[in-house]
Image (tube, rainbow, N blue to C red):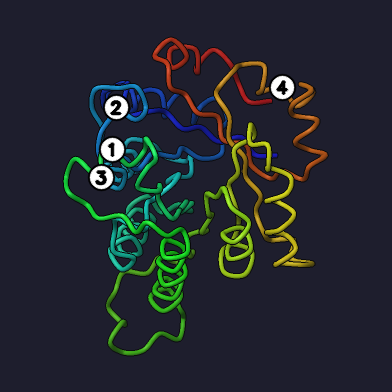
Amino acid sequence: MIVDIQVSAATNPWPVLRDATLAAEHAGYGAALVYDHLAGATLGGSTMLEPFALLGALAVATTGIELGTSVINLGLRSPAAVASAASSVATISGRHVHLGVGAGASPSSRFAAELHAVGHQIPSSIAARHVVVEQAFDIFDAVWSPDRPDELGTFPSPDLRPTIVVGLHSRHLAELAGRRADGVNVPWSSARRDELIDVARGARPNDSSFVVTTWTRWAPELLDPEHPDRRTMDATGIDRLVLAVLDRADVDRIARHRVM
């Protein structure tokens, strides 16, 4: 199992994000992921950084750790712009990019407050939000295809296509991700975790390249593969574990604990 890290830009300024990512690189983490939020309040902070701008900065501040998002709200961003941004990060860094994407929050969710604040219209139907995700897959496939048409010929396209991982909470999106994406990301704390993973795998039978990712709060004991939760993750078939670092105190501890 590969262990990735996600340090919050809501509660940590750029110099801390840079130094924490460098510490994670030296500590053996596989990838550094960033959030996609307009404001920091959702994550208990007072500010935020745009995800692809942050990844561009991390691309030149680091040398080996892979980079990615978790997760891009496809209801807020043009899929073509997302494809271009991910390609640009991959080109600048010369590394693999993990493109975590999702359908976005419902209008009544607490996560939607930042979108309401700027007058963004969120479809009330979950089905409509899922249509947006499937349409984005069409754009990604077209832009990154080795046989793309001439009119897309000068769009940025990295040597290694980004891995598309869908953050999800529903069976329909799990099935869609299984058919169209490269993997899924499900919260470890979710009561439906195993169900959603099974649905996604069922839509992608016998494909060993399909990536199953889970995330939970950072804790140093989770870096030990013999920890009970890590053993359960192994038994579930988790490929990558994302540890989310929200508290400043935990940021300061990253360098003191290596991934085993």
Front residue of this view, candidates 100 and 62: 100
Question: Which amino acid, by three-letter code, is at mark 1?
Answer: Ala
Q: Which mark is residue 41?
A: 2
Label placed on residue 224: 4
For the residues labelled 1 and 3, say whether their Cβ atoms are less than 8 Å apart: yes
| Nearest the eye: 198 or 29 | 198
- Residue tagged 3: 115
Where disc 4 sits, the SS reads: loop
- Foreground disc of the pair 4, 2: 2
Q: Dots 2 and 1: beta carbons under 8 Å?
A: yes
Of marks 2 and 3, which one's residue comes earlier in the chain? 2
Q: Residue at x 70, y 51 (%)?
A: 197
C-alpha span from label 1 to label 3: 5 Å
Report x, y in % for residue 21: 42, 29
Q: Is residue 228 above or below residue 168?
A: above
- Number of other residues with Cα within 10 Å of mark 4, as a class: few under 14, some 14 to 19, many 20 or more: some
Question: Spatial distance from mark 2 to mark 3, Cα to Cα?
Answer: 12 Å
Which dot marks residue 43? none
Q: Nearer the viewer, mark 2 or mark 1?
A: 1
Residue type at mark 2?
Ala
At label 4, which amino acid type do we have? Answer: Asp
Image quadrant assignment for residue 128: bottom left
The location of residue 54, given as percent across then percent down, is 29, 40
Which residue lies under the disc numbered 1? 113
Q: Amino acid at mark 3?
A: Leu
- Which one is nearer the viewer's eye here, 56 or 7? 7
Mark 4 or 3 closer to N-term?
Answer: 3
